[in-house]
């Protein structure tokens, strides 16, 4: 089953574990099936689980790094 095609302006996230999340905004969807993303926020928790002592979230308005593109799985 194909997943729905990403929409421009949509915010998606990835996680490399329970303590770190990266948030990306879809900035372009090409007819050839490539999606361009811009990282816009990240959340990191510091401290001992299950109760982290510090949580840091960068604001959505800021851009992190350069945009990148990947082939959409919905194609």
Image (tube, rainbow, N blue to C red):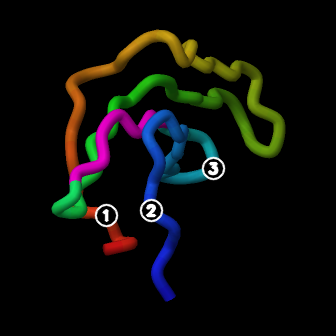
- Residue 4 is tagged as none
User: Mark 1–mark 2 contact, CB under 8 Å?
Assistant: yes
Residue occupying the point 24% across, 62% down: 33
Q: Name the mark nearer the viewer: 1 or 3.
A: 1
As drawn, the label of residue 5 is: 2
Marks 1 and 2, Cα distance to the nearest angstrom?
7 Å
Judge left or right: residue 53 versus residue 73.
Answer: right
Image height check: is 1 above or below 40?
below
Q: Mark 1 vs mark 3: which is more N-terminal? A: 3
**Prevalent SS, magenta region:** strand
Q: From which residue to which does the magenta span run?
A: 23-30
Check disc 3 and report its element: helix, strand or loop: loop
Asked if the residue at tag 3 contacts the one at tag 1, i.e. Cβ–Cβ closer than 8 Å, the answer is no
Q: Residues within 10 Å of mark 3 (few under 14, many from 20)?
A: few
Neighbor class of circle 1 (other Cα within 10 Å; few <14, some 14-19, many 20+) is some
Residue pictured at 44% horizontal, 62% vertical: 5
Name the outermost residue toward the front.
31
Residue closer to the observer: 4 or 45: 4
Q: Which residue is mark 1?
A: 72
Side (left or right) of 8 relative to 37: right
């Amino acid at each position: 089953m194909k997943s729905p095609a990403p929409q421009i302006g949509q915010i998606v996230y990835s996680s490399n574990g329970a303590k770190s999340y990266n948030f990306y905004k879809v900035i372009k969807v090409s007819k050839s099936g490539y999606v361009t993303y811009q990282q816009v926020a990240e959340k990191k928790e510091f401290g001992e689980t299950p109760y982290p002592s510090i949580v840091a979230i960068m604001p959505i308005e800021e851009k992190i790094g350069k945009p990148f593109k990947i082939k959409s799985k919905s194609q």
